[in-house]
Image (cartoon, rainbow, N blue to C red):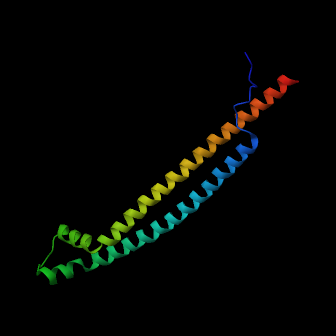
Amino acid sequence: MRRRAPHADLPGIPDLVEELGRLSEELDEALRFQRSRAERWAESENAYRLARAAAQLEAVDELQKAKGWDRPTVDQQRAWVDLQTEKERVEAHLADKMLDAAREAVRARRAQLSAMQSVATAVRTEIEFARGQAA
């Protein structure tokens, strides 16, 4: 029975270096995407808050004019504000979820890079062990 070299099934150092470089580039790209999603979230959240504030200031007057109500209830005012800010609210919530997805992508890339660093360490240890056995 022929005995295999202890490191014969391990990836080579050039392969590891290439893979680590690729994963590092993917992490950089994920970080850039996360940054852009954070900016988009901040812009859309700000637009929503401004639209909501403006609608809240107009709610009583608009409901009195449109519906002829003397004193609209708080729930009626909230409903009117929600109707007036629907587009901004949806955009802000979508931007928030996209930011969450971007954060998850960064976490996944970091985990992949960490795993590959562990493999590289194991390969280095195996090679050092094999060299010690050959001496």
- Location of the N terminus by quadrant is top right
Residue 84 vs 22, above or below: the answer is: below
Residue at 53%, 66% in the rendered image: 36
Left or right: 75 in relation to 122: left
Residue 42 vs 65, above or below: the answer is: above
Residue at 32%, 78% in the rendered image: 54
Tell me residue 22's x, y (percent). 65, 52
Query: Along the line of sight, which residue is nearer the eye, 85 or 124?
Result: 124
Tell me residue 49's x, y (percent). 37, 71
* Figure quadrant of residue 45: bottom left
Left or right: 9 in relation to 94: right
* Figure quadrant of residue 114: top right
Residue at 71%, 36% in the rendered image: 121
Residue 119 vs 33, above or below: the answer is: above
Query: Along the line of sight, which residue is nearer the eye, 103 or 69?
Result: 103
Tell me residue 77's x, y (percent). 21, 72
